[in-house]
Image (tube, rainbow, N blue to C red):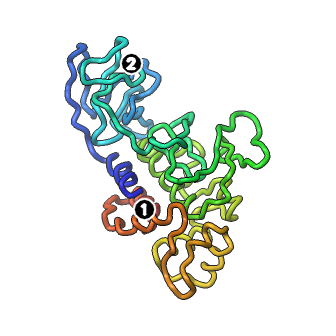
Amino acid sequence: MKVAIASGLLAAGFSAALPVQAQTGFVRPDRTDGVPMEGASRCPQRWQESSRLASDERVGYCYPSYANSPSIMRRTGSNCPSGYGVDGEWCSQGHIEHPLLNNPNVMAKAHQADRCPAGFYTYLDKCTTELARPPKARVKGGGACRAGEIAEWGIWCTSDFEHLSVQDIRSAHYRDWNYIYSMTRGGNPRQGPGDEDASEVYKHMFGDSKLDGPVGSANGALVRGERLSTEQRNLLANANAATAAMLPPEGAGGSTATSATAGAADADKSQCDEVKLRGKLGQLARRALGC
């Protein structure tokens, strides 16, 4: 988790070197000018459409999402020049590996700024997860969810989530919000701007409408290795079996890390000092790492 969070957040502040490509006669502008979409339905991978919130960006142009975003050009034929691969209506330089999407539970979503269901987080234009046993989720559509499913964010029907711990959901939730914020260049999720607003699954499981409510705050203290108060221990012990299994013996601080993501969260704590982001992004990055 630590590498993905750091790269996903930090890269938004860097400029990419954008070499001129003249093989097809198209000279791409530098980052300041962006790359005109020229009727394309979307920007290529690791690029994003201009944000209306950014005064220095023009609508209908693509801007790099990361410092290492590939060189691109609009595709004019069925093939791309040597060294470029087809990416929809674009030619993109080189072959891009996306290990975070290399698992069978990746789901497409309708819009890059849509929130992902519990246990999942945004990467590029999809929802991915690092849980060995993630919940089951499907696109809700216009109908009602089935028995055993919960309508989540108004766009998902989610089920089989009872085995998730508080940490499993909170960690993915913050990561999801962070990626959306970064990928949209400071935009908010389409389902609401609140980074602490809990999804319907979290509310159903733990009773809090906010991720930093009593249960979430107790979980944060647990992940940070703080000594828990009696009230905090009781909240976590009664949350569900997966959360209770993370509790250390009475009188001890820290977590037993038996949750699906607790081990990763504990490892991330050592990276807290490496988070150099300031303001909102820094606050969220540290929170997701359990700092």
Picture layout, residue 172 above or below residue 84: below
Whole-angstrom CA distance, mark 1 to mark 2, is 37 Å
x, y percent for residue 285? 42, 59
Q: At numbered mark 2, what does the secondary structure look like: helix, strand or loop?
A: loop
Residue type for callout 1: Gln
Which residue is pictured at 57% across the width and 34% down the height?
110
Instruction: Classify residue 203 as left or right of residue 65.
Output: right
Instruction: Classify residue 225 as left or right of residue 231.
Output: left
Residue position marked by numbered label 1 in the rendering = 283
- Quarter location, residue 101: top left
Q: At numbered mark 1, what does the secondary structure look like: helix, strand or loop?
A: helix
**N-term-proximal mark, 1 vs 2:** 2
* Nearest to the observer: residue 135 or residue 157: 135
Picture layout, residue 228 above or below residue 83: below
- Quarter location, residue 289: bottom left
* Nearest to the observer: residue 7 or residue 13: 7
Quarter of the image where the N terminus is located: bottom left
x, y percent for residue 100? 43, 45
The numbered mark at residue 38 is: 2
The numbered mark at residue 207 is: none
Mark 1 is surrounded, within 10 Å at the Cα level, by few (under 14), some (14 to 19) or many (20 or more) other residues, namely few
- Quarter location, residue 238: bottom right
Which residue is pictured at 49% across the width and 45% down the height?
122
x, y percent for residue 10? 33, 51
